[in-house]
């Protein structure tokens, strides 16, 4: 009888401890890589209204990516959530009158991808957007919900119009 109880106890222990596979739990955040040749934007770059540019970066994850979002918003008050190790020359602080805002989500479905996305920040012809210091904020999410961020300080200006 003791042998049956011992065998039963060993079987339950094996099921209990064998069923806990901690190796299958994703513990890694996705990676946003701006070190590829031609990656854009880099810290302190300038983006011009009404001129298309190419977002270029490399995204990867140990399992699979789900999406990335781009949030561009003003930094006229010099707040910081930059992830960049460099400090850009900032304009004087100012009050936002008609700040530009861009928020866009993009779906992904692979473990790694070289992103090459054409983007155009159109000006508002009725009331021009405020130019100056902005944050180019990327958020990359994998299929398990892990998220990485990249906050890149940029200038958003009008070219050759005297409105900078």
Image: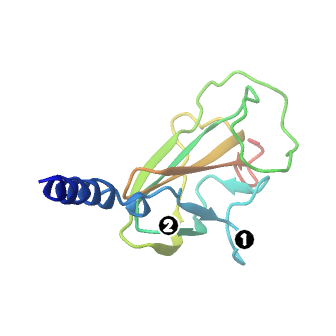
Q: Which mark is residue 92?
A: none
Q: Residues within 10 Å of mark 1 (few under 14, many from 20)?
A: few
Residue 25: percent from left, percent from top? 40, 57
- Give the number of marks: 2
Residue bearing mark 1: 35
Q: Residues within 10 Å of mark 2 (few under 14, many from 20)?
A: many
Residue bearing mark 2: 61
Q: Quadrant of the N terminus?
A: bottom left
Residue 31 higher or lower than 148, as above or below: below
Q: Is residue 100 left or right of residue 107?
A: right
Residue 37: percent from left, percent from top? 72, 78
Q: Residue at x 52, y 58 (%)?
A: 28
Secondary structure of the residue carrying numbered label 1: loop
Secondary structure of the residue carrying numbered label 2: loop
Q: Residue at x 50, y 67 (%)?
A: 61
Residue 98 higher or lower than 45, as above or below: above
Q: Is residue 11 left or right of residue 35?
A: left
């Amino acid at each position: 009888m003791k042998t049956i109880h011992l065998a039963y106890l060993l079987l339950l222990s094996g099921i209990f401890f064998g069923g806990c596979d901690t190796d299958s739990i994703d513990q890694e955040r996705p990676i946003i890589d701006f070190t590829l040749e031609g990656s854009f934007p880099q810290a302190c770059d300038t983006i011009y209204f009404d001129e298309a540019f190419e977002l270029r970066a490399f995204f990867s994850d140990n399992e699979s990516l789900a999406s990335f979002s781009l949030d561009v918003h003003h930094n006229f008050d010099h707040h910081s959530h930059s992830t960049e190790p460099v400090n850009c020359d900032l304009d004087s602080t100012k009050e936002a009158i008609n700040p530009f805002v861009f928020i866009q989500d993009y779906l992904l479905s692979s473990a790694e991808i070289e992103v090459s996305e054409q983007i155009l920040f159109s000006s508002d012809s009725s009331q021009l957007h405020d130019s100056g210091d902005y944050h180019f904020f990327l958020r990359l999410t994998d299929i398990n919900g892990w998220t990485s961020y990249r906050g890149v300080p940029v200038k958003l200006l009008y070219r050759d119009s005297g409105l900078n």
